[in-house]
Amino acid sequence: MSANLAALDPALLLPPLIAGWLVLATHVPLGRRVLARGIIFLDLAIAQIAVLGVIAAHAFALADDGWPTQLAAAAAALAGAALLAFCERRWPDIQEALIGSTFVVAASLGVLLLAGDPHGGEHLSELLTGQILWVGTAQIVQIALLYAVLLGLWWLRGSRLGALGFYLIFALAITASVQLVGVYLVFASLILPALAVRAWPARSGVIVGWLLGALAYAGGLIASALFDLPAGPAIVIALALSALLGGVVLRHARARFGLANITASHCGEITIR
C-alpha cells in the first residue's frame, strides 16, 4: 500500500475536518456526562433510533437529504430519548439493559424496513460509517448553529437540566451528528476522548479531550487520503489510538507533576479533593 501525497488536498480535507471538530465540541462534554452516569450505550441507542427515523423516511420515499428526513430523524430520536428518560426514572436498576434492548430493536426494525430495497445495504452502510468526506459548507453552517444553541443550553443550565433535559439535548446532538459522520464516528467521538480525560477537572478535561479528538480527526483524515481508506473507520481507529496513547501520557504527566487526586462527582461534574 503506497501513499498518495497528491490526495492531500486542503479543499477536500478541510470541510470534513471542520465538521469533525464541531462534532467534538458537543460530544466531549456529553461523553463525560455519559461516563459519569454509567449509561455508556445511550449514544448507540439514540443514534440507532435516529437512523431508524432516516430509514423510515427513505422507505416512505421522502427526500433523503431534505427537511422531512431531518424531522423524521429528530422526532424519532426525541421520542426515544423521552422513553429512555422515563425508563431511567421508573426502572433505574435495569437502565443499561433497557438501553441495549432499545438499540437492538431499533437496529432490527431498520433492517426490516430496508429488506425490500435493492440498495438497502449500501444505504445502511452509509448511515453506519458516514460520508464525512462529502460534507458541504451548508451542512457545516447548519450544524454549527445547532451545536451553538445546544452548547449554550448546556453551559447555562448545566445540572439544572435534569434527566429529561439531558436526554433531549443529547438526542438532538446525536441526530445531527449521525447524519453528518455516521453512527460509528458518533460513538467514538463521544466515548473515546472522554475516556482519556475521565479523571480530569471539568473545564480542562473538556479542552484536553477536544484536543485529543481534534488530532485524531486530522490524523485519520490524512491517513484516509494518503492510503485511499474509508474516512469514517480510519478516524475511529485514530480516535482509539489517541485515547489510548493520550490517556497513558496524561496519567504519567499527572503522576510526575504531583497533581491532586481528581474524582468524578455523582452529578457528572468533576471535583478535586
Image (cartoon, grey):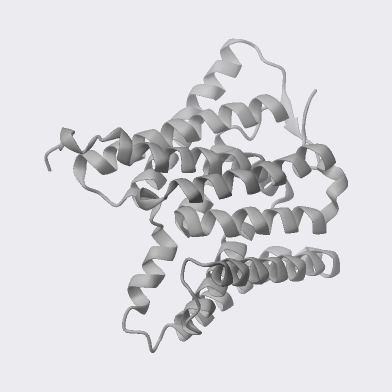
How many numbered circles are shown?
0
Residue 101, by quadrant, is bottom right
- In the image as oriented, which residue stretches furthest toward the left? 2
Q: Quadrant of the C terminus?
A: top right
- In the image as oriented, which residue stretches furthest toward the right? 160
The structure residue drawn at horizontal position 81% and vertical position 68%, both measured from the top left corner, is 86
Please give left or right for residue 42 compared with residue 222 in the image: right
Q: Could you tell me residue 42's position as x and y percent?
A: 64, 59
- In this rendered view, identify the residue nearer to me: 182 or 245: 182
Q: Could you tell me residue 68's position as x and y percent?
A: 57, 72
The structure residue drawn at horizontal position 63% and vertical position 73%, both measured from the top left corner, is 102
Using the image, determine if residue 79 lies above or below residue 250.
below
Q: Quadrant of the N terminus?
A: top left
Using the image, determine if residue 32 lies above or below residue 206.
below
Q: Could you tell me residue 156's position as x and y percent?
A: 82, 38
Please give left or right for residue 231 compared with residue 4 in the image: right
Using the image, determine if residue 41 lies above or below residue 20.
below
Q: Could you tell me residue 57's position as x and y percent?
A: 53, 77
Residue 202, by quadrant, is top right
- In the image as oriented, which residue stretches furthest toward the top? 257
Quick check: can you spot residue 145? yes
The structure residue drawn at horizontal position 33% and vertical position 71%, both measured from the top left corner, is 122
- In the image as oriented, which residue stretches furthest toward the bottom? 116
The structure residue drawn at horizontal position 46% and vertical position 38%, both measured from the top left corner, is 18
Quick check: can you spot residue 39? no
